[in-house]
Amino acid sequence: MDYTLEVPHSELLVVRAHQPYNAEPTAAALVEFPITPEDLIYCRNHGPVIEYDEDTFTFRVNTPQGSHTFTMKELKEIFPRHEVVAALQCAGNRRKEMDGVKKVRGVLWNDGVICNARWAGARLHDVLQHVGLDVDALTGWHVWFESHVTLCQDDNYYGASIPLTKAVSPDGDVLLAYEMNDQPLSPDHGYPIRTVVPGYLGARWVKWVDTISLAPDESPNFYQQLDYKILPEEVDTPEKAAPVWSKVPSLTTLPLNSVVGSVTRKGDDAILVKGYAIACGDVQVAKVELSTDDGTTWHEARITYQEGKWSWTLWEALLEHVPASGVVYSRATDQSGQVQARNGKWNMRGVAYNPWGQKKW
Ligand SMILES: Nc1nc2c(c(=O)[nH]1)N[C@H]1C(S)=C(S)[C@@H](COP(=O)(O)O)O[C@H]1N2
Ligand SMILES: [Mo]
């Protein structure tokens, strides 16, 4: 692959791979900001990051009725600008911890491949309506998102799909986004256009998207079919995985999770603990609790930030009368009463890992 046009990147990230560029901030830095500043947003790529020209960039929408091409100018002029605050999280968040349980395959991400941003763009629903799509006639169909402009590692284009029901749900908030945090998207995050799929794993948020198609099946792309799935625990080699991929569902939402971002000593026997939590899909986090005695007693943390149904949750707690050193655990509960379990499930690709958060002090 050709990396000669690669753009410069933030200096504040821990680089996990240079080509393609994969980098994440520390969770300690992340939890200081409700809306993640651009420089602290992780970068997850399967190919080079190039700056495209907004004036000449076009994207095509293919439906059973025909094909329509839009320029960026048209996208902004024809459709109302819609904003949504949503967390973006890579399915590989916390993979390094899972690798500590048993070796996994993939970029060894710590707990920083998550961010929370204010996205703006056209609603995908509005665009599909504009091209005359008859949604009711397409029960069970899918919307494919493809980026052909940039080459990638495992296929000859990057692709993903989501169910049409998610794409057209009035409160699903799926966008063809051109802004992040009130600025045009940066090349790192998909300039000039990416999909925003609130509540779904990052892999479906296709950057530099240039083709959107309606189809009765999921996208055939490598990243939809042969990756981003929770393989059964006994599948621990690519050979064992080969016949299993097609039998396992593609990930859509990620599970309820919480992470301890930082622990700061306050005086002789107190600690200030800060972290983030995220719930599954459109259910929000109801509470986060902390334990310094291995899960015997729990103290409820104060929620300091939550916005709408797609944001992450920030929390903090001052724990007093604690020993000089120890381990603090976090666990989240969502609005439906589901509680984050102590252990996560191991899987070969290291996705969707969500045991209690934990940090030593
Ligand atoms: N075109 C393209 N889109 C992509 C990817 C990619 O490699 N190429 N990576 C996906 C994955 S796995 C994630 S987690 C998010 C990361 O978005 P970010 O780099 O803006 O944080 O983008 C998704 N969209
Ligand atoms: Mo990802």
Image: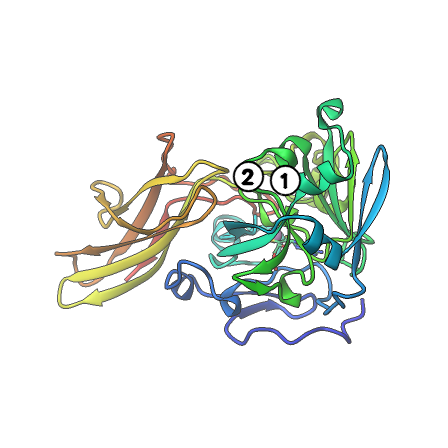
Mark with earlier residue (1, 2): 1
Q: Residues within 10 Å of mark 1 (few under 14, many from 20)?
A: many
Q: Amino acid at mark 1?
A: Lys
The residue that appears at 75% across and 26% down in the rendered structure is 138
Picture coordinates of residue 175 (x, y %)? 62, 47
Q: Is residue 351 above or below residue 7?
A: above
Corner quadrant of residue 74:
bottom right
Label 1 residue SS: loop
The circle on residue 253 is 2
Picture coordinates of residue 166 (x, y %)? 62, 34
Can residue 259 be spotted in the picture?
A: no
Quadrant in the picture for the N terminus = bottom right
Can residue 274 be spotted in the picture?
A: yes
* Tag 1 and tag 2, C-beta contact below 8 Å: no
Task: For ligand 2, tell me if the residue under mark 1 lies within 8 Å.
Answer: no
Q: Which residue is mark 1?
A: 229
Corner quadrant of residue 236:
top right
Q: Is residue 57 left or right of residue 357?
A: right
Q: Amino acid at mark 2?
A: Thr
